[in-house]
């Protein structure tokens, strides 16, 4: 008999056990067989009841795996649906850097949730994650017209902003989930057009290009502070605008000429610096030579002064030596004069006269001898005068 539909099929082990039971029962009903001796004896068979097979563990393991798989699938579906804001999800996840915002029956709830897993009522409460960390919004293709009527466009403007966590409910209540479209995307278009219409192409493209980001940032932040205080504009980065090709070529030519002029000016400055450097080198060399000459002259003057002083000392020594020698000679002469004065007696003079006469190798005799040799009378008178002078001195 076929098993009913939906019932589980019997396993191979169960079929084998039933087949073995049938074989055993048939063996009991087999007729007697002849023995080899020709006598008929009943065939002895021992029937041992077979132990039931242990239940197979494959079915239980399979059921457990299927159960775990279904549970994981349900959880993944619930979590994945929570990230898309589905109203059918029960469990939802708030990612890091966001807060969970909820609507119940279309009304925004004031309560928010932090990052993590949270529960909500399906079909009644809607959920949306709102980023409260720093984010960068890129506004692309912004056309504008300058004061002179030239149409230009900005390919991309990046706005770094942040929604304060404490102002999430107020901002979303007034401007909705897409608050950045009102206060960033549309506001950037408005501010760029305002700036371009008030300035010429020269100012927008070259002269005041470095001021556009600060002016746009200040303007957006001022309006956000007044109407949407939860939005904080951190910085604005503006790319170079696209201008007509002919005008761009003119600007490039002007920039080339300006570059050539700057190069000429820089060359002139370099030449001036080189000349100034040469001048400073020459002045330094002249000052060095002057200082060296002055030092050499001072050295020569010092040598001359030293030589002069040395000569003065030598002269003083010579004068002192000559003076000492003169004094000594004067003293010697004076002493000799005193000695001679004491020795000049008539007797001594007569003795000297006689010695002088005696020392002559030749003696002349005759009538003219008195004229050659001193007269005795003159000699006597001389000696008498000396003796008288000596007595007067005494």
Image (cartoon, grey):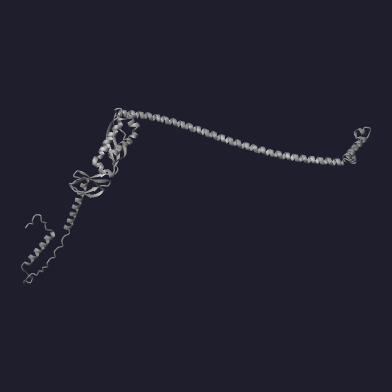
Do we see residue 132 in this rendering? no
Q: In this view, does 41 lie to the left or right of 338?
A: left
Do we see residue 279 in this rendering? yes
Work out whether 318 lies above or below 72: above
Residue at the outermost right position: 367
11 vs 342, nearest the viewer: 342
* Occupied quadrant, residue 263: top left
Q: Which residue is drawn at 25% across and 49% down?
A: 116
Residue 140 spot, x, y in % from top left = 27, 36
263 vs 112, nearest the viewer: 112
Q: Residue at x 43, y 31 (%)?
A: 267
Q: Which residue is drawn at 59% across and 36% down?
A: 296
231 vs 388, nearest the viewer: 231
Residue 166 spot, x, y in % from top left = 28, 45
Q: In this view, does 156 lie to the left or right of 375?
A: left
**Screen quadrant of the C terminus:** top right
* Occupied quadrant, residue 24: bottom left
Residue 378 spot, x, y in % from top left = 91, 35
Q: In this view, does 355 lie to the left or right of 65?
A: right
184 vs 249, nearest the viewer: 184
Work out whether 1 lies above or below 333: below
**Screen quadrant of the N terminus:** bottom left
Residue 293 spot, x, y in % from top left = 58, 35
Q: How many discs mark residues in the rendered view?
A: 0
């Amino acid at each position: 008999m076929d098993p009913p539909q939906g019932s589980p099929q019997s396993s191979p082990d169960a079929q084998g056990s039933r087949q073995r039971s049938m074989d055993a029962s048939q063996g009991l009903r087999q007729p007697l067989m002849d023995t080899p001796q020709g006598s008929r004896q009943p065939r002895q068979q021992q029937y041992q009841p077979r132990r039931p097979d242990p239940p197979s563990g494959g079915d239980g393991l399979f059921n457990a795996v299927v159960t775990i798989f279904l549970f994981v699938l349900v959880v993944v579906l619930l979590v994945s649906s929570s990230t898309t804001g589905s109203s059918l999800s029960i469990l939802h996840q708030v990612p890091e850097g966001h807060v969970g915002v909820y609507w119940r029956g279309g009304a925004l709830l004031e309560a928010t949730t932090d990052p993590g897993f949270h529960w909500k009522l399906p079909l009644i409460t809607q959920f949306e994650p709102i980023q409260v960390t720093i984010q960068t919004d890129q506004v692309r293709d912004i056309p504008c017209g300058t004061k002179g009527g030239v149409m230009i466009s900005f390919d991309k403007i990046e706005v770094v902003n942040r929604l304060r966590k404490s102002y999430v409910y107020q901002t979303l209540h007034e401007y909705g989930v897409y608050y950045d479209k009102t206060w960033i995307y549309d506001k950037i278009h408005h501010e760029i057009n305002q700036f371009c219409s008030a300035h010429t192409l020269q100012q927008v493209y070259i002269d005041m290009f470095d001021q556009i980001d600060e002016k746009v940032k200040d303007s957006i932040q001022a309006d956000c502070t007044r109407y949407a205080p939860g939005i904080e504009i951190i910085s604005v980065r503006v790319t170079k605008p696209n201008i007509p090709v002919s005008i761009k070529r003119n600007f490039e030519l002007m920039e080339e000429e300006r570059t050539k002029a700057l190069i000429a000016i820089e060359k002139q400055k370099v030449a001036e610096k080189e000349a100034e450097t040469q001048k400073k080198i020459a002045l330094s060399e002249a000052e060095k030579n002057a200082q060296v000459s002055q030092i050499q002259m001072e050295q020569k003057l010092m040598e001359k002064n030293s030589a002069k002083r040395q000569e003065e000392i030598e002269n003083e020594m010579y004068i002192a030596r000559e003076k000492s020698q003169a004094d000594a000679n004067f003293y010697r002469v004076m002493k000799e004069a005193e000695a001679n004065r004491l020795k000049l007696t008539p007797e001594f003079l007569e003795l000297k006269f006689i010695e002088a006469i005696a020392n002559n190798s030749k003696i002349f005799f005759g009538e003219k001898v008195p004229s050659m040799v001193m007269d005795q009378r003159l000699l006597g008178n001389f000696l008498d005068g000396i003796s008288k002078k000596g007595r007067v001195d005494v």
